[in-house]
Amino acid sequence: MDIKAKLSKLVLFMFAILAVTSCEKTIFDDEGDCSLHYHVKFRYDMNMKYADAFSNTVSHVTVYVYDADTKALLLKQTETGEVLAREGYSMELQGLKPGTYDIVAWCGDGVADGHFDVHNTTVASSKLEEISCTMDREEGGKVTKDVGQLYHGKQRVVLSETYGTHYVTLNLTKNTNTVRVVLQHLSGLDVNPDDFIFEIKDENGYMAYDNTILDDEVLTYSPWSVTAGSAGINSDIYNKPVTRTQTSVSVALAEFTVGRLVTENNPVLSIYNVRENEKVLSIPLKDYALLVKGHYNRAMSDQEYLDRQDEYNLTFFLDEHGQWATSRIIINSWHLVFQNTDF
């Protein structure tokens, strides 16, 4: 071996020694150059705008970190409040070693306010398949309150053993929906909200670690707000001239917060007329929500559309007998006219 080759090996060896010494000194001095840091970033772009809305919408996060092999819960960590809205926010995972892990997150003010309960989360004794989340309800499966917002995320990650700070991103899906139901008379007559009972029935209040819906009792959602409203009109309405005395329209508005809509379930929206003691309408909510999926979303699966579209505004028109005029409905500003319809 010539002198030049020996010198090259010696230089490489010296650099290696220097690197090890530097790392040992850095770790000892807690300067961070060769330490390990693992951070989770959260992303909520499963919405119709495809834009990350995490910092503007999520005010509470709790993550659960499981060993990928043993499925044991190793770490539970929570952060809440204004820190989540800071640009570039991430949660540092404390005490983890390099390896492969499954991360589950339940987030949102619905968790913080106790409207959702996350079960089986005892560190060192709970397993991945055991964690679940249930919506709070009254006796008989009645949900009468605004349950707030719930988000879920799950991902397997590999945490590198290379010194430095490492980031993983957890994508979230929103598990709650806002449903607004408007009742309006075709004739323009006033609608008294006290004359009607609104409800939505579904079996979507019990969620597994992977966000699938588990068997549960039927939940009966009641609106957390029912109000009357009116709006002025100054043009033709329903293809009829507006009379001089018809200067506004009156509506009844019911607002719900319901759990995640999934394709395998069949949620039903019903409205009852209290004075007449009869059902005004009963429709399959999921099917009606998908009616306005539209041309530009045709490549999207039905489940993805239901997950992205978290707000549904439905307007129903009543005839002179207080019954639903089944030929006409507005869903999220889409004006649908049905022909020869029999619901």
Image: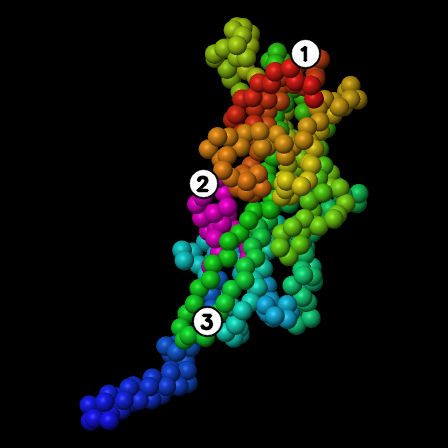
- Range shown magenta: 41-63
Q: Say what amino acid the circle numbered 2 marks.
A: Lys
Q: Say what amino acid the circle numbered 3 marks.
A: Ser
> Residue at position x 41%, y 70% from top?
165
Label 2 or label 3, whichever comes before in sequence order: 2
Q: Nearer the viewer, residue 29 or 35?
A: 35
Q: Which mark, by number, is residue 160? A: 3
* Real-space Cα separation, disc 1 to disc 3, in angstroms: 69 Å
Q: Say what amino acid the circle numbered 1 marks.
A: Glu
Q: Which mark, by number, is residue 334? A: none
Magenta residue check for 59: yes
Which quadrant: the N terminus? bottom left
- Identify the residue position indicated by label 1 in the image: 320
Question: Compared with residue 90, is residue 147 higher up or lower down, i.e. above or below?
Answer: above
Residue 193 falls left or right of residue 331: right
- Identify the residue position indicated by label 2 in the image: 49
Q: Nearer the viewer, residue 254 or 153?
A: 153
> Residue at position x 57%, y 18% from top?
337
Closer to the observer: label 1 or label 2? 2
Q: Position of residue 316 (x, y in %)?
A: 62, 22
> Residue at position x 50%, y 74% from top?
98
Badge 1 element: loop
Label 1 or label 2, whichever comes before in sequence order: 2
* Real-space Cα separation, disc 1 to disc 2, in angstroms: 40 Å
